[in-house]
Image (cartoon, grey):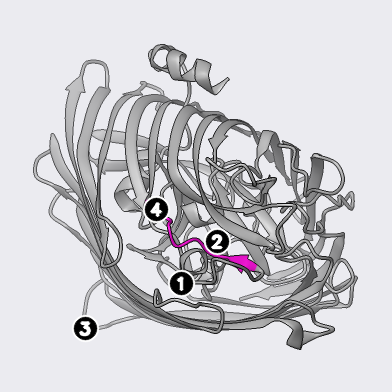
Amino acid sequence: MIRIVKVALPALLFSLSTSVLASDINQEKNNDANNEVKNDVEKPSPDIEKIMVEGSITANNKPVGTFGSPVSNLEYDPRVDLQSRNMAEAQADVTIRGGIFENTGFRVGSATLVDPQTGHYFAEIPIAQEMLGNANVFTGADNALLGMNSSVGTVSREWKQIKTAGSASIGAGNNNSNLQRIHSAVSIELEDFTDWSIGFEGEYSRSESDGTIEFGDHDFQRASGRIQLAGPSSQTDLFFGSQEKFFGWPNMYTPFNVNETEDIKTKLLILNHKQHYAQDSTFEVSAYYRNNNDHYVFSRENPESFESFHETDVKSIGLSGRHAQTTAFALNYSAQFIEDNIRSTSLENNFTSRTYYKFSVLPEYRIELQDEQQLSFRLGAAFDDTNRDDSQASLIGDITWNTVNADDTSQTLYISYAEASQVAGYTAIGGSNTGGLFRSNYELERETTKNIELGLALDRETWRLDSAIFYRQDNDLTDWTYSLTSTSARTANPVDIDTLGVELIAIKRLENAEIITSYTFLDKSEDYGLADIDASFYALNFPDHRVTLGVIWRPTSIVEVRVDNEWRKQEKNILRNGDEDALFTHLTVKISPSQIKGLDIMLAADNLWNESFEEVPGTPGRGEQYTISATYHW
């Protein structure tokens, strides 16, 4: 099928197809406290409107059995495929559009938070979710412009303005699970400075459980806080967070029927400043230090058989912005510098430190047409380099046609072409290449990606449709593979993959309900260039077909029901035990008694049908989790 697409795609790109959620690199509106689904129109200039879906496109906004993290509920986001071990908040590989976990970046402000050891720990970000806006998923041209060492997609979050509020939560459930959490924020206006305020925000969260399957226990805790200075055209945040996580899972990373454990400690310090100036111009600068300690044990019954210790340090500064020279011309730009190092008991060569550089510019030209129509062109490039790898220049461009109707409905059609690149982590290139549980490959080269897509977004008074067709070529992608004749659990190998994808996302708003549904299709053609590969853990672990259905229903003023469903048909894999298809459901019922203002009682269930599907081949799937919790808001 891929060969047919290579011939037919140029013709398809001039036929009516559809688009993914449009992303905007300009200022986000503040998201509402409940993180509900809503549609807003961003205004990059007084005369131009660009559509984007604001807010979460999942019905549920809190996990079951633990406290929220940057990966919570992404498993029901149609833009993202979450492949978890134990549960999403324990260890989850976040993939976008059929990529692998190391193709995905997590961006806060203007900086991408990386882990030099492996992409398994990208999402170890100890930030309370009240501090951040909803996730924007950048793909194509926006990812090529704003992403860093993430060739397929970036999950991007913005710092929210602090509002005086707070909450305290307790919860319990089956599997001896329990949760305690407190969050508080205060914003104080500065009397001598008009429209200026200083804010303080902090939280402490913890949870523990015996696990939804045997040897699937967890013990988590997180503390985070920030100070914010906000003015009429700027916001400055100083943040520090610390997180400790212990969790176990059978066959977590290896297919050898052992009970593995991980103990992860993460510290994060961030300074962020965002400034608006002139007419529709803005820039943001972010600097961070991240320390991550990981202790991996192959067998909890026999820890001395194999264990490894890793400690990584990352320092980074990132800058991004948009300078509007005139109403017709603007310059979008981004730059980031990263310096990292690792101390590890399992790395055998001298590849233990690296510096990364990226610069990208994307000039934008707009033409006003008749009848509230606008045509915009963006064409630019990105440059990536490190002190250890070859550099890479990448082309970025798109054309967007936008129409705003008299009734404020709109439609947007775009075509884009984007190139991106990245380098592999230290686990893939710095360990033993002859044996051990995880076999490295010293011949891995810089990975490159070429993505072309066509999209259409329709925004109406009570509904919205976003859709896209895309074709991506990944060259020298680092995958982790398995051979039936090898004693290694995983071996790093390069692969060339061509991917065809279709995405359809629809939102319908009713009087007392919202419905969010989606369908995605993926088809791949791969070439490893090797004969001794029997299975792929990541690059070929993807759903051919996937459907999501989310509903938010408010039958009365005191009851709210949220339900997310996902059905998938997974590509076959010889390491997977059980079926290739699965149905997951996450259900929450919230009761807010009128007699006690601010009190919410939550009944929640995850994996309602006790689906045993292996999200990572050879790794057991999670079981059922039920909880009851109470939260008091002030």
Q: Are marks 3 and 4 in contact (CB under 8 Å)?
A: no
Residue 127: percent from left, percent from top: 51, 74
Mark 2 lies on residue: 33
Q: Which label number is shown at residue 541?
A: none
Mark 1 lies on residue: 163
Q: Do the residues labelled 1 and 2 touch (CB within 8 Å)?
A: yes
Residue lying at 43% horizontally and 72% vertically, measured from the top left: 162
Q: Which label number is shown at residue 29?
A: 4
Residue sitting nearer the eye, 500 or 300: 300
Residue 439 is one of the magenta-drawn residues: yes
Residue 476 is one of the magenta-drawn residues: no
Q: How far apart are marks 1 and 2 (CA)?
A: 10 Å
Name the front one of labels 3 and 4: 4
Q: Do the residues labelled 3 and 1 touch (CB within 8 Å)?
A: no
Q: Are marks 3 and 2 in contact (CB under 8 Å)?
A: no
Q: How far apart are marks 4 and 1 (CA)?
A: 14 Å
Residue sitting nearer the eye, 356 or 147: 356
Name the front one of labels 4 and 1: 4
Residue lying at 25% horizontally and 54% vertically, measured from the top left: 391
Provide the secondary structure element on which disc 2 rests: loop
Residue lying at 33% horizontally and 37% vertically, measured from the top left: 418
Magenta stretch in the rendered image: 438-446
Which corner quadrant holds the C terminus? bottom right
Which corner quadrant holds the N terminus? top right
Label 4 is placed on what type of residue? Lys
Residue 207: percent from left, percent from top: 73, 79
Provide the secondary structure element on which disc 1 rests: loop
